[in-house]
């Protein structure tokens, strides 16, 4: 199976978590795009949809779905999203697509967070993938200096503006021995909007697609 086939397989397995009457949160990225293609098949099971990005909203609307706001819906039953890395505790790095802040809100507002990945993303220790950090543009240099003190090497994702009008720093070289602690340390830096370490709110279910099919891990 190539990477795209694995993404499709993980997305298909996630459909099993959409039960009749589900209030569904939808993440962002190429794996989630595979899920979005399949959502018309389970349209009658979806009560309402909330989206984590403008890109996802556009795709859902193209398929005729009405996208509600989290303010309207309050919370969701299931949030389905991809990730850039997961460890065995289902703690994640997310934000490769730059939607990390809204993704974090939707993950927090969901009763169950189902994460869909291919097996290349399951790692022993988080941090090979650079950690995305959304920052206020006026605080970018200040936050960068603080991240260097944490032994990271922040690289500005030049030319990219988030859906919230902010910038993203991709931080290489962080030793994430304790993801809970690192998430807190980065979150505490003034000017940080969100950090793409999802340790305090990990996934509840991880669907990992490999050559032998899709296997499931739970917290
Ligand atoms: C977007 C994300 C994505 O879930 C993550 O980058 C994985 O993307 P893909 O499914 O394209 O590999 O966090 O902000």
Image: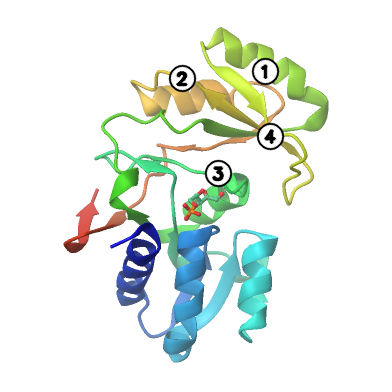
Q: Is residue 64 left or right of residue 181?
A: right
Q: Quadrant of the N terminus?
A: bottom left
- Which tag, 2 or 1, sits closer to the chain's start? 1
- Which tag, 4 or 3, sits closer to the chain's start? 3
Q: Give the alpha-carbon distance from disc 2 to disc 1, as whole Å.
A: 13 Å
Residue at image coords 58%, 65%: 74
Quadrant in the rendering for residue 38 = bottom left
Q: Give the alpha-carbon distance from disc 1 to disc 4, as whole Å.
A: 12 Å
Dot 1 alpha-carbon crowd within 10 angstroms: few under 14, some 14 to 19, many 20 or more: many
Quadrant in the rendering for residue 73 = bottom right
Residue 28 screen position, x and y as percent = 55, 58
Q: Is mark 3 within 8 Å of ligand 1?
A: yes
Q: Give the alpha-carbon distance from disc 3 to disc 2, as whole Å.
A: 16 Å
Residue wearing tag 1 = 144
Residue wearing tag 3 = 95
Q: Give the alpha-carbon distance from disc 3 to disc 1, as whole Å.
A: 17 Å
Disc 2 and disc 1 in contact, CB within 8 angstroms? no
Q: Give the alpha-carbon distance from disc 4 to disc 3, as whole Å.
A: 12 Å
Residue at image coords 41%, 28%: 127
Residue wearing tag 4 = 157
Looking at the picture, does residue 184 appear above or below residue 70? above
Residue wearing tag 2 = 174
Q: Give the alpha-carbon distance from disc 4 to disc 2, as whole Å.
A: 17 Å
């Amino acid at each position: 199976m190539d990477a795209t086939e694995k993404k499709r397989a993980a997305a298909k397995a996630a459909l099993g978590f959409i039960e009749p009457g589900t209030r569904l949160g939808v993440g962002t990225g190429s794996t989630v795009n595979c899920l979005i293609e399949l959502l018309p098949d389970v349209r009658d099971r979806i009560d309402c949809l909330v989206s984590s990005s403008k890109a996802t909203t556009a795709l859902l609307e193209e398929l005729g779905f009405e996208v509600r706001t989290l303010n309207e819906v309050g919370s969701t039953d299931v949030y389905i999203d991809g990730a850039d890395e997961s460890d065995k505790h289902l703690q994640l790095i997310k934000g490769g697509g730059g939607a990390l802040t809204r993704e974090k809100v939707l993950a927090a507002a969901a009763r169950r967070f189902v994460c869909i990945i291919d097996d290349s993303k399951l790692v022993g220790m988080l941090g090979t993938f650079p950690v995305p950090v959304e920052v206020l543009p006026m605080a970018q240099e200040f936050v960068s200096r603080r991240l260097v003190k944490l032994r990271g090497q922040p690289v500005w994702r030049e030319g990219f503006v988030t859906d919230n009008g902010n910038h993203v720093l991709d931080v290489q070289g962080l030793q994430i021995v304790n993801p809970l602690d690192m998430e807190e340390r980065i979150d505490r830096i003034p000017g940080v909007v969100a950090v793409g370490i999802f340790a305090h709110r990990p996934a509840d279910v991880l669907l990992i697609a490999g050559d032998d099919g899709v296997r499931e891990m739970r917290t």
